[in-house]
Image: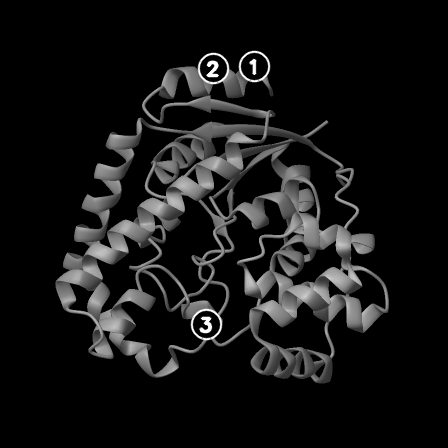
Amino acid sequence: MNTLFVIVGPTGVGKTDISLQLAKLLGCAIFSCDSRQMFRELKIGTAAPSEKQLQEVPHFFIGNKSIFETYSAGQFELDAIPMIESELKRTKNTLLVGGSMLYVDAICKGIDDIPTIDPQVRQGVLEFYKKEGIEGVRRKLKLLDPLHYDEVDLKNVKRMLHALEVCIMTGQPFSNLRTQSTKKRSFNIVKIGLVRPREELYNRINQRVLQMMEDGLEDEARQFYPHKALNSLNTVGYKEFFNYFDRVWTKDFAVNMIQQNSRRYAKKQLTWFKRDKEIHWFHPQQTDEIITFVKEHL
């Protein structure tokens, strides 16, 4: 059976370099599962592959969407699976690379079939939240779906609102629709995780943010400041600069917060990926070991 090699890891760990080496070894393309590198306008702040790197190896899902378009992990699954299957017919092996947790799961496990929310239902739930606040949302969710209430992060308003939308839209608990079963794929999946010691990773993240500043991150963020309300721009590297442009923060503080929020995101990614016992972990500099591992699974 053909094999999809999945390369995951926290932001700044060094996924791009090793994935380029593996793609050249396998003679295949790279499928990105970075939910922000898909936006063609956001190049510097998302650390998207350079033009040179894109020319070295074919990439899919890099710069293929606009910040003005809505996109989700569920749509990514629908778009990417047929393309991965087509690529595997040609090359027998290919790569999925990135750190967006839900997008990785969309390919490896599949997304549950949650219905599209009617705009009127969404507006009604938002108005309820504005009137009753987070405590009202919690009470409503506990009434409609006590199982999900016990599982969800009760500080995460966005997730609770979405669960309420689904409950109201379908007339049944949100938890009933979340089977959490893994979909069967037509290809093998082999997962490789990249990790560095914390201090080493955090130093790389801090330096990468400084390099982004030299590359023009402030100007890139300022270009899209008029559209700061877009969900696509609720992104580390941009939302901090919007606070600077709003004169809430100083520039130095905004840069420090980009570094801090990037480190927090890296920690969150590692916590998520470490739960997956199918991931085989390597330091990015263990190139020979990684290549040997890949060859053993061809």
Residue type marked 2: Thr
Residue drawn at 34 percent across, 36 percent down: 13
Residue drawn at 77 percent across, 40 percent down: 181
Q: Quadrant of the C terminus?
A: top right
Residue type marked 3: Ile
> In the rendered structure, are the residues bearing label 2 and label 1 in contact, judged by CB atoms less than 8 Å apart?
yes
Q: Residue 191 appears at what percent x and percent y?
A: 56, 29
Q: Residues within 10 Å of mark 1 (few under 14, many from 20)?
A: few
Residue to which mark 3 is pinned? 67
Element class at badge 1: helix
First in sequence: mark 3 or mark 1?
3
Alpha-carbon distance for marks 3 and 1? Answer: 40 Å
Which mark is drawn over residue 215?
none
Which mark is drawn over residue 292?
2
Residue 104 lies in what quarter of the image?
top right
Residue drawn at 35 percent across, 50 percent down: 49
Alpha-carbon distance for marks 3 and 2? Answer: 39 Å
Residue drawn at 73 percent across, 60 percent down: 142
